[in-house]
Image (cartoon, rainbow, N blue to C red):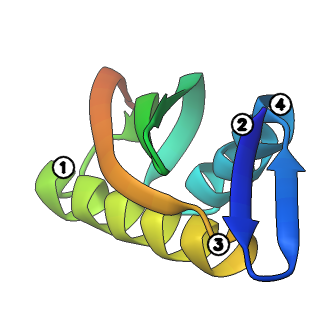
């Protein structure tokens, strides 16, 4: 559980929900062919996210990684109010469609 406190009280969000949300966000990004692992680590009032992804070949790896990092960070913060300290991406496989 990750707890957020504000002037209205405390809100608890399960890690399972956050993993599902991050999975949906990541898989919706262009060039991402699959997601092997999502790890969410509480770090004070923020979280660190580690992703293991598979991407399509013929795409720009730095551009895809940058897009995933920004989208995951923005949507997670906007939807839940949780600050994302870092998003670390590991590319496990590059899939060819030949």
- Residue count near mark 1 (Cα–Cα under 10 Å), binned few <14, some 14–19, many ≥20: some
Give the alpha-carbon distance from disc 1 to disc 2, as whole Å. 23 Å
In percent of width and height, residue 24 lies at 73, 52
Q: Secondary structure at mark 1?
A: helix
Give the alpha-carbon distance from disc 4 to disc 3, as whole Å. 16 Å
Verify CB contact (< 8 Å) between mark 4 and mark 2: yes
**Foreground residue among 93 and 43:** 43
Give the alpha-carbon distance from disc 4 to disc 2, as whole Å. 5 Å
What number is the disc on residue 81?
3
* Residue 19 drawn above or below residue 24: above
Q: Is residue 54 left or right of residue 60?
A: right
Between circles 1 and 3, the one closer to the viewer is: 3
Q: Which residue is mark 4?
A: 16
Q: Earlier in the sequence, mark 2 or mark 3?
A: 2
Whether residue 10 appears in this view of the structure is yes
Q: Secondary structure at mark 3?
A: loop
Residue that appears at 85% across and 58% down: 11
Res 53 → quadrant: top left
Q: Earlier in the sequence, mark 4 or mark 3?
A: 4
Q: Earlier in the sequence, mark 1 or mark 4?
A: 4
* Residue 30 drawn above or below residue 36: below
């Amino acid at each position: 559980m990750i707890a957020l406190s504000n002037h209205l009280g405390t809100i608890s969000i399960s890690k399972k929900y956050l993993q599902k949300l991050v999975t949906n966000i990541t898989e919706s990004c262009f060039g991402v062919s699959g997601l092997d692992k999502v790890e969410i680590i509480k770090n004070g009032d923020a979280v660190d996210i580690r992703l293991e992804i598979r991407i399509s070949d013929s795409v720009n790896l730095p551009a895809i990684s940058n897009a995933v990092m920004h989208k995951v960070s923005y949507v997670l913060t906007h939807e839940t109010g949780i600050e994302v300290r870092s998003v670390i991406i590991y590319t496990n496989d590059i899939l060819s469609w030949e």
